[in-house]
Amino acid sequence: MMNRLATGCILLTVFFAGQVLAIEIQPTSGQIHAALEAGKAAAKDGRPPDSFYVRFGAGDDLHPGGFLITKLGALSVMATHMALRGLEPAEADIAQVLATKTMLVSTVIFGEVPTFAQESYMVFDQAGRTIKPVTVRFDGQANRSAAWPERPRFKAKVVASFDYDGFDPQAKTTITVFPASGGAESFVLDFAGIQ
């Protein structure tokens, strides 16, 4: 089952990477239609809605990682959810997703005390230019990690929203999370390869 899921995610990533050259801030009607159809196909094939998240970092329970959701990805997620219920997204639902001004980035980081993620911050770096988020949320109380009581003992989410107008959707980008307790976790992505 896990190999089939991993293969599906890889094929999905290849499928979308071949169709879009960057994060689309103003998707065309053809791209919107393709994203909605991909969501319907995912539901028909039994793939979960979160298969449209763009994942980065480690894919296990003991190392930092995360995901981001683009406008086209959000349309596919919505279409999958709706199709699983035998419904189709309404025009108002589609318009609401397309009107979104920010891109969500969610990360999971690890630390040694339950409060390590409090006051964490996240930024993008694009060729030396620092882009600050519109909002940042973090777990005030981290959960025990899969390694508990060994290290890393705790894991926490840090979630930020970045204004689409504030970053280059085609640039190589380093996402860095700064826990208030010190240190940093960085993830390098090429936005040009993301839909």
Image: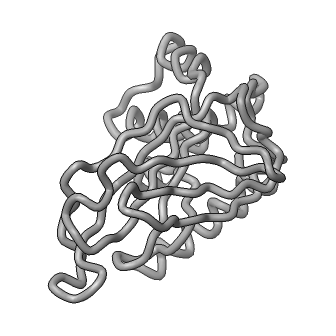
Q: Quadrant of the N terminus?
A: bottom left
Q: Is residue 156 left or right of residue 87?
A: left
Q: Quarter of the image holding residue 11?
A: bottom right
The answer to whether residue 36 is visible is: no
Q: Residue at x 48, y 67 (%)?
A: 183
Instruction: Say whether residue 106 is left or right of residue 143.
Output: right
**71 or 136: nearer the eye?**
136
Left or right: 53 as drawn, with respect to 172: left
* Residue in the image at 45% along x and 41% along y: 80
Residue sitting at x 50%, y 11%: 92
Quick check: 181 above or below 39? below
Determine whether 180 is above or below 9 in the image. Answer: above
Rendered image quadrant of residue 173:
bottom right
Q: Position of residue 170 (x, y in %)?
A: 82, 45
Labels in figure, total? 0
- For residue 82, above or below residue 20: above
As rendered, which of 103 and 184 lies closer to the eye? 184
- Say which quarter of the image contains residue 23: top right
Q: Is residue 25 above or below residue 132?
A: above
Q: Is residue 98 visible?
A: yes
Residue at 61% across, 55% down:
175
List the single residue furthest toward the bottom. Answer: 150
Q: How is the image coloured?
A: one colour
